[in-house]
Image (spheres, grey):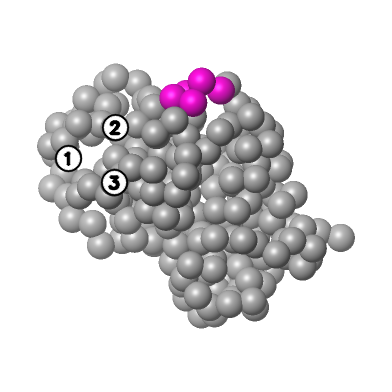
Amino acid sequence: MSRLKLLPTLASGGGAQMALDDGLLETAETAIARRYLWSPPALSLGKFQKLDLVPGLPFDVVRRPSGGRAVLHGQAFEWSFAFVFAFADLGSRSLQASYRFVNDAFAHALTAVGVTLDPVRAIDYRRSGLCFATALRHDLMAAGDKVVALAQARRGGRVLVHGSVLERRPPIELVTAVEALLGEPWLGDGLAAAGVEVDGEQIWARVLSYVDTALAGEIAPA
């Protein structure tokens, strides 16, 4: 029997997506996972990130319950995911333990579909308002590009670990608007930089299988 409750894939606007993630963090009574698509495109900001907005942007702007920097979302080039666990599910209250739990699952899934991942911290940390412009040790990279970004929030004995999988470079009109808004160039072609065409549903299925097995205690996360 699965220890992980799976929600159906939802294609919706950024406000609804972030409200759902926040609601799951507030109320989930079991380990929950979901994959979601942003329609229309949106720019999500970290909980404490400050940004002066301008009118006429070709995407919505929303704020995440987690920290971090701006992520550009859109179902033509990216998909997102969320897990909510009780600390007891993970056997630890450590920040790194919860990140590592999900990091291990995506590393396993991407490797299984033919993606060669870079060593941890393959690029130097750089100051940027854009999430995919740099990487921390819990992010995943391939061919020098960040491909999976993770962030988390904690509340009431639960942890939300959510993130973004960048499949390819966003459309030029979105990139141009983000560059003008943030005042810096877009960096990141995602999984396309690794030269591997991958199916998001296939990756997600492997991630779920790994997490479910780990929750059952049959895998000890690295």
Secondary structure beneath dot 2 equals: loop
Q: Residues within 10 Å of mark 2 (few under 14, many from 20)?
A: some
Question: What residue did someone put label 3 on?
Answer: 124
Main SS, magenta residues: helix
Labels 3 and 2: the sequence-earlier one: 3
The picture places residue 209, in percent across and down from the top left corner, at: 74, 49
Closer mark to the observer between disc 3 and disc 2: 3
Residue 181 painted magenta: no
Residue 6 is left or right of residue 77, and the answer is right
Q: Which quadrant is home to the C terminus?
A: bottom right
Residue marked by disc 1? 182
Observer-nearest residue: 146 or 118? 118
- Three-letter code for the amino acid on which mark 2 is drawn: Leu
Q: Is residue 51 above or below residue 184?
A: below
Is there any visible trace of residue 23 in the rendered image? no
Would you name the residue on which mark 2 appears?
Answer: 187
Q: Is residue 193 highlighted in magenta?
A: yes
Q: Position of residue 159 (x, y in %)?
A: 52, 69
Q: Amino acid at mark 3?
A: Asp
Quadrant (top left/top right/bottom left/bottom right) for the N terminus: bottom right
Element under disc 3:
loop
Q: Residue at x 48, y 67 (%)?
A: 96
Mark 1 and mark 3 lie on one chain; the one further toward the N terminus is 3
Distance from the alpha carbon under mark 1 to that under mark 3? 20 Å
Name the residue at 51% across, 61% down: 99
Q: Nearer the viewer, mark 1 or mark 3?
A: 3
Local SS, label 1: helix
Asked if marks 1 and 2 touch (Cβ < 8 Å), the reply is no
Read off the magenta span.
192-196
Task: Name the residue type under label 1.
Answer: Leu
Judge the density around disc 3: few (<14), some (14-19), many (≥20) Cα neighbours within 10 Å.
few
